[in-house]
Amino acid sequence: MNAEARNDTGPALHIIPRDQHTVSRKNISKAALRVLYRLNEAGYDAFLVGGAVRDLLIGHTPKDFDVATNATPDDVKKLFRNCRLIGRRFRLAHVVFGPEIIEVATFRGTGEDDNAEGERRIVDGRIVRDNVWGTIEEDALRRDFRVNAMYYDISDFSVRDYVGGMQDLRDRVLRLIGEPVTRYREDPVRMLRAVRLAAKLGFSVDAAAAAPFETLGSLLTEAAPARLFDESLKMFLAGYGLKSFRTFEQYGLMKFLLPATARALKRGDEGLRALVEQGLANTDARVLEGKSVTPAFLFAVLLWGEVRDLAHAGIERGDDRNEAWERAAQRVVGEQCQRVAIPRRFTYAMEEIWALQPRFEQVQRKKVMRLLAHPRFRAAFDFLLLRAHESPAMRELGEWWAHAQQLPLDVLAAALPIATGNAASEAEPAPAVHKPPRRRHRRGGARNKPA
Ligand code: ATP
Ligand code: MG
């Protein structure tokens, strides 16, 4: 039987015993179990919490395992040699097991009964510091969505549902805990989390949780750019990027995080939309296959439309071609980085991917050889393939370069015209290179070196 008890602030607490839910220790990482057991043996309460419990209950594989406890960060540090304390706004213990980090958070209080010593600070409705310890009930209430506020108790393997999360899992809906406007004002990033989790889980966003997006969406522009970079990666590089993108756009939030993307798409270019969606779909497929993905390629895709249109406008005004591209890239990257702090090493790579695009149109011998040998050739070529959505000419150009890479370099070189000093124009078709009689498999490194 489910144990039930009322609490004042929310619905009844449901305690779901081990034989009535699907969370199994088999599916919890060894590292997380060790942390849970160790805390429990030392006399503390220890729960698996948040996304991991939610995901296990619906049969997904959790991305990370978070632990909640009544032990303070200092207590946790004493129990684990492999522990470091992090965070100012939100002080936490990280217990490190090789590549895996288990985040251990002390139950947060509401800070309302204030012996708080300034540890919970709210400025203009926004939580800027949240380090008041509290009870598990309070901890549940300060979480964002009801499905994220369930606790798996290591002492008896039950699941505690304080706010109706189980119901929402059944309804496949994200409902906020508390009053939506207040909760978004406290932390605007919760709006992004709503959209991201809806995409990830295939849930809908409850109408009450979605209603404030229109009026409060602009608060996202005040969120910390470094945090928004992290959130963007969770949204677009975690295997459900295309769905995130569509959900994000559907809820009208894109313009606050990716203004250039929103503007370019609004100009109504279907080719651009197809390019972006294909880029995101390819990224999702790579994540699924366990291949590496980079924020540089992602943002190069997301921002391309605006860069391209600005560069073309500059060239039409009579600007030097290279300068027009460079200026467009810098302007778009500059604006984007005010919202989302993309680290320099990625913006540099993005700029290179873009700068190489016009060079694909120059198919004289020397230039082709030089481009093939460029360290960023692979990414730039993958990008060119996405541009097949822009025009039939671009598709052909992509096919030409795909084919050119199959050829032995000497055969390719012999088929190409020697440079005359004039760059091939966009209108001029690339010279025909014929398929070799037999496909030769060459290794990437060798292919990229000029003969
Ligand atoms: P994912 O599966 O992508 O990791 P998640 O819900 O686990 O999703 P995390 O960022 O790992 O997301 O957060 C862990 C838990 O911390 C959440 O489930 C939620 O309970 C709580 N949480 C995270 N961010 C917030 C927030 N901005 N406001 C309130 N609670 C939050
Ligand atoms: Mg998580």
Image (spheres, rainbow, N blue to C red):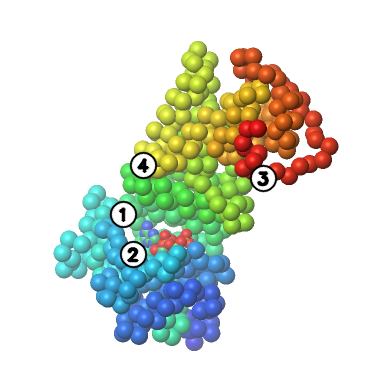
> Which x, y percent locates residue 162?
40, 73
In x, y percent, where is residue 291? 58, 54
Query: Tag 1: Cα neighbours inside 10 Å, few (<14), some, or many (≥20)?
Result: some
Q: Is residue 152 above or below residue 194?
A: below
**Distance in Å between CA atoms under marks 3 and 4:** 46 Å
15, above or below 442, in the image: below
Mark 4 vs mark 2, CA separation in Å: 23 Å
Q: Tell me how far mark 3 sits from mark 1, CA to CA.
A: 53 Å
Indicate whether 248 appears above or below 348.
below
Could you say which disc has been placed on residue 186 in the image?
1
Mark 3 → mark 2, Cα distance in angstroms: 54 Å
Residue hosting label 2: 142
Disc 3 + disc 2, Cβ < 8 Å: no
Q: Which residue is mark 3?
A: 443
* Tag nearer the camera, 3 or 2: 3
Going from N to C along the chain, the mark reached first, 4 or 2, is: 2
Look at the numbered discs 1 and 2 and tell me whether their residues touch, using CB distance below 8 Å.
Answer: no
Q: Is the CB–ligand 1 distance for label 3 below 8 Å? A: no
Measuring from the top left, give residue 4's x and y in whole percent: 42, 82
Pointer 3 or 4: first along the chain: 4
Is the residue marked 1 within 8 Å of ligand 1, measured from its CB?
yes
**Three-letter amino acid code at the position of disc 1:** Glu
> In the image, is 21 to the left or to the right of 129?
right
Give the amino acid at mark 4. Answer: Thr
Secondary structure under tag 4 reads helix
